[in-house]
Image: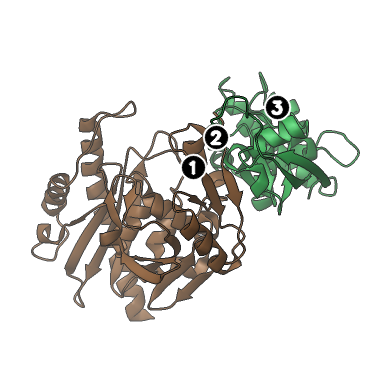
Amino acid sequence: MKPAAFTYQRPTTLTQALAAYAAAPEAKVLAGGQSLIPLMSMRLTSVPELIDINGIEELSHIHVERGQGVRFGAIVRHAQLHAHAEAREVQPLLHAALSHVAHATIRNRGTTVGSIVHADASGEMPMIMSLLGGTLTVASVEGRREITAEDLFIGPLETSLQAGEIAVEAFVPALPARHGVAFDEIARRHGDYALCGVGAIVGLDADGAIEHVRAGYVSVSETPAVVDLTGCFPDGELTEQGLKDAAELALTHLEPEADIHASAEYRAQLARTLTTRVVAAAHADAGARANAEVTA
Amino acid sequence: MTTPGSTAEQTETIRLRVNGVTHEVDVPPRRLLSDALRHDLGLTGTHVGCEHGVCGACTILVDGQPTRACLMFAIAAQEYELTTVEGMTRPDGSLGPVQQAFKDCHGLQCGFCTPGFITTIEAGLEENPDPTPEEARDMISGNLCRCTGYQNIVKSVRRAAELKRENPTGEGAGQ
């Protein structure tokens, strides 16, 4: 359980890091390392060269733009983002989902951007990016570009980043008015990989009728799965039948698989149960927020 | 490296600040922080269990925050203040409050997981000095005890909180 030998660089500016990466495209970028280091220790990946970006001060920012969203740099730890009160206010789903990312000890070191580009469909953060329609900013010696979540996750543990590109910042849009969110997951132990996790966002119109419903899924697909469930609530009302239909509709987009922790059938059942639970909670949250906005 | 006989690995001289003392050691970049502490510095209080971040036995404090020493490279830990279980005693060398609580409450059996619990709880009580039993459980949820002595570990968390309140000045070193 020891990593193979590699060479190590610790640049202190992004320009240095990008130049180093351009010169060694087979290198890996080290941020929090909470997924990369186990992979290296178990020799599931071999890394000839490591570019450690933890010393790059310009990647440590959290910018909250009210009405716009939350921007955070590549070395922002999960714990920092989780504890950021203003970020929580602007996009509460970020905070709710971060509470479920691994154990507190891992969140102290692991980075949210790192978790996004690790692109594990059993991780919460890739799903949150997809569900909220976030964007990732990547940089290389050629310049910068933005990638939408939709174009980012192209396969299991695979993103559309090109050789020499470093993810420098992620952006998650603010929660619009009259919208509510909820997140829940089932794991053998809080902080372990979820057997299944669901996040939902519900938008209401000015009269309180459901305008749209979307849900995102953890651990039941190969790439982060987001399903539009609006059609299950044709009258704008949250009904038991609507929730049941939503759960069944969601399942047609998911591919729950069996492993030592759960059978495929059990995971499917969790996806059903969590869909009804989380969509109902997001609907209640939207109602509460809409009321608070009116009285504010 | 692939040539037979050329087994020597490039090392670098790094500085690690552990429990208030600066150490200088030569390590290859791939040296895990957990191994550097144990093998290079002889601080064998930090235990190594799963070596992939699951068990929590190697948890140390990095700038006061619980962190897995097996999920950091020693070479990347130079800018931080590291605290291991050896730094959890009181300044006079007697048991720190969390260590004392484990002794009082029979919070350890084989003791293998204990250093990771002690460091985690030390930092947890800094953040939440009076945890409920449920909060105590949450605090230690990232650490495994294969003797399954969890009930007494939860009691130890609460007892440690009491001891810290009774003697707030006698904190463990490395604060």
Check if mark 2 and mark 3 are on a common chain. Answer: no
Asked whether residue A243 appears in the rendered view, the answer is yes
Q: Amino acid at mark 2?
A: Pro
Name the secondary structure under disc 1. Answer: loop
- Tell me the number on the disc at residue A47: 1
C-alpha gap between disc 2 and disc 1: 9 Å
Q: Which residue is mark 2?
A: A3
Q: Residue at x 62, y 60 (%)?
A: A55
Name the secondary structure under disc 3. Answer: loop
Q: Amino acid at mark 1?
A: Val
Coloring scheme used: by chain
What chain does mark 1 sit on? A
Please name whichever residue, A49 or A167, is drawn nearer the observer in this view of the structure. A49
Q: In the image, is residue A170 above or below residue B132? A: below
Q: Residue at x 45, y 58 (%)?
A: A113
Tell me whether the residue at label 2 lies in contact with that at label 1, contact meaning CB atoms closer than 8 angstroms: yes
Asked if residue B89 lies left or right of residue A238, the reply is right
Q: Nearer the viewer, mark 2 or mark 1?
A: 1
Please name whichever residue, B86 or A42, is drawn nearer the observer in this view of the structure. A42
Tell me whether the residue at label 1 lies in contact with that at label 3, contact meaning CB atoms closer than 8 angstroms: no
Chain the render paints brown: A
C-alpha gap between disc 1 and disc 3: 45 Å
Q: Which residue is mark 3?
A: B105
Name the secondary structure under disc 2. Answer: loop
Q: Nearer the viewer, mark 2 or mark 3?
A: 2
Q: Mark 2, residues whose alpha carbon is within 10 Å: few (<14), some, or many (≥20)? A: many
Check if mark 2 and mark 1 are on a common chain. Answer: yes
Chain B appears what colour? Answer: green
Asked whether residue A282 appears in the rendered view, the answer is no
C-alpha gap between disc 2 and disc 3: 39 Å
Q: Nearer the viewer, mark 1 or mark 3?
A: 1
Asked if residue B158 lies left or right of residue A14, the reply is right
